[in-house]
Image: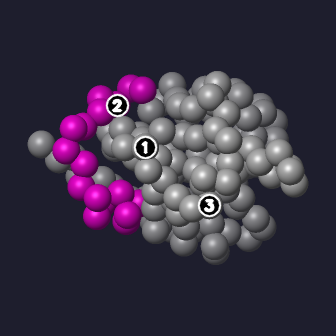
Amino acid sequence: MRRELAVPPVGWTMLRFALLKASLGVAGFARTLRWIQGRAQRTPLVADVDPALVAKAEYAVAMAAALYPGHAACLERSLMLYWDLRRAGVPVSYRMGVQMYPFLAHAWVELDGEPINDVPEHVRLFRPIEGVAA
């Protein structure tokens, strides 16, 4: 059975970006991720995921990030998308990776091992940080 994914309005997501950025600044990344995971784990995962709904959620987060006054980097965009999809029971994973030279870090969300808010060619440039996957 498919669960209907309620995509928050862009304005609400922009406000949540502000709250997320504040949490990252005050509590730090590890505590913010644990908080999101704690809420996400309360929702049982669904087996039958509608790809159109996942794409709709990804588009909504991308749109809110583009309109957000300031900068919503891949870290914030991926945490927000992970949070939204996991609250809907979608079995996604939050991933982070690094490139050593030149040093770069990146975050993305995967469904069935494939990135949904990035392209595979870009993600392959980064070595996943195993302890951060959620």
Q: Residues within 10 Å of mark 3 (few under 14, many from 20)?
A: few
Instruction: Please tell me whether mark 3 sits on a helix, a strand or a loop.
Output: helix
* Extreme residue in the left direction: 1
Q: How is the image coloured?
A: one colour
Instruction: Please tell me whether mark 1 sits on a helix, a strand or a loop.
Output: loop
Disc 3 vs disc 2: which is toward the camera? 3
Q: Residue 77: x and y, percent? A: 61, 56
Give the residue displayed 54% in from the left and 40% down from the top.
94
Residue beneath disc 2: 43
Q: Residue 56: x and y, percent? A: 37, 65
Give the residue displayed 67% in from the left and 33% down from the top.
129
Report if residue 43 lies within the magenta region.
yes
Q: Residues within 10 Å of mark 1 (few under 14, many from 20)?
A: few
Alpha carbon of mark 3 to alpha carbon of mark 2: how far? 30 Å
Of label 3 and label 1, which has the lower sequence position?
A: 1
Q: Residue 55: x and y, percent? A: 38, 64
Which residues are drawn in magenta?
Answer: 41-57
User: Hey, what amino acid is under mark 3?
Assistant: His
User: Hey, what amino acid is under mark 2?
Assistant: Thr
Of label 3 and label 2, which has the lower sequence position?
A: 2
Query: Which disc number belongs to residue 122?
Result: 3
Report if residue 101 lies within the magenta region.
no
Residue beneath disc 1: 113
Q: Please say whether residue 2 is visible from this viewpoint.
A: yes
